[in-house]
Image (cartoon, helix red, strand yellow):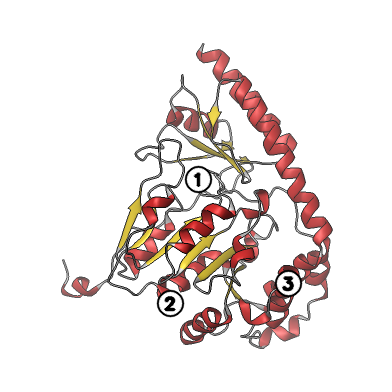
Amino acid sequence: MEAFEKNIRRVEPYVPGEQPRQKVVKLNTNENPYPPAPGVERALRELDTADFRLYPDPACSVLVDAIADFYKVGKDQVFVGVGSDDVLSLCFLTFFNSDKPVFFPDITYSFYKVWAELYRIPYECKKVDEDFRIVKEDYYGANGGVIFPNPNAPTAIYENLEFVEDILRHNRDVIVIVDEAYIDYAGPSAIELVDQYDNLIVTQTFSKSRSMAGMRIGYAIASPKLIRYLNDVKYSFNSYTLNRASLVCGAESVKDREYFEKTVAEIVGTRERTKERLAKMGFSFTDSSANFLFVTHPEYDAGDMFRALKEAGIYVRWWDSDRIRQYMRITVGTEEEMETLFAFLEQYVSKEN
């Protein structure tokens, strides 16, 4: 080892889903199969590229205003960043500074562990039960903060607001973050609880239900005090987080509620039909409330099936890790994409038999 390597910070990095360059049926990263709202394209066409020589608005006002209007919250209750990953990372850096461990589930978004290790934050992973549900009582003990997705990933399980509020009531002295990347496919959002709990932060993203993963837009909604703390860290770290195109296009996306609700409904409909088709083939799965399904088959190895799907040009997600090794995560795509998936799986199951 070279002498300088002793001072290099090392972490085990998050492993993102594959982004193949060839044309495939891509059901591995929970992207939306439909295009963004029509106003997004118009906004891009109308952008004055001469303005690209100028820094974007550090306050991100046009987007903050649109989000605040959509959710009927104050502008001082909204924080935006470069995808919800950026927002969550800043939340870890800002709010999780106790000597006590931060609590999050053992089966969840794997970036949480990466950020905790990167920022030298102590943490404890609380085991989900045999049905992959979060056990709320495990979050009652002394801790330095709590974070969990709702719906959870990769399990797709949604917990109602009574469940969320129970965790909040037992953690009044620490920050509780509810990561709602998939909430629009599920049920009521914890945003409803923000005014009651000044220690609650709710994060969401434009990458799923708003079809803008490539624009990298995320946001948090919380009390004005917590948003001020986040902005203090942001301005000390990277003042100009979102580019001009993302700000304008994000605002246009939020304005088109009708298109947003229509595409969400289409995905939910496809998801429910997918459950029926997979069940007929003998698959079992959690009760998905997201834009993906977490599936297993009692007769077939998930790793073998994952590799066979990939060989056929159908990409899904699989983890070679304890407790979920026999599960695959399948994004809900277009009807045509799902039919391609069904055709392959039906053939795979009949061939194996």
Label 1, residues with CA under 10 Å away: few <14, some 14-19, many ≥20: many
Which circle marks residue 168 in the picture? none
Q: Earlier in the sequence, mark 2 or mark 1?
A: 2
In three-dimensional space, the C-alpha distance between marks 2 and 1, rounded to whole angstroms, equals 26 Å
Q: Nearer the viewer, residue 57 or 127?
A: 127
Q: Which residue is mark 3?
A: 72
Which residue is located at x 63 percent, y 51 percent?
Answer: 31
Left or right, 246 with respect to 201, comes to right
Disc 1 residue type (three-letter) = Pro
- Secondary structure of the residue carrying tag 3 is loop
Q: Quadrant location of the N terminus?
A: bottom left
Vertical comparison of 54 with 147: above or below: below
Left or right, 260 with respect to 83, comes to right
In three-dimensional space, the C-alpha distance between marks 1 and 3, rounded to whole angstroms, equals 30 Å
Q: Which residue is mark 1?
A: 154
Q: Position of residue 58 (x, y in %)?
A: 61, 85
Disc 3 residue type (three-letter) = Lys
Label 2, residues with CA under 10 Å away: few <14, some 14-19, many ≥20: some
Which residue is located at x 66 percent, y 24 percent?
Answer: 343
In three-dimensional space, the C-alpha distance between marks 2 and 3, rounded to whole angstroms, equals 25 Å
Label 3, residues with CA under 10 Å away: few <14, some 14-19, many ≥20: few
Disc 2 residue type (three-letter) = Thr
Q: Quadrant of residue 57?
A: bottom right
Which residue is located at x 51 percent, y 11 percent?
Answer: 353
Q: Nearer the viewer, residue 29 or 262?
A: 262
Q: Nearer the viewer, residue 107 or 218?
A: 107
Which residue is located at x 65 percent, y 84 percent?
Answer: 56
Vertical comparison of 236 with 311: above or below: below
Left or right, 236 with respect to 37, comes to left
- Secondary structure of the residue carrying tag 2 is helix
Which circle marks residue 94 in the picture? 2
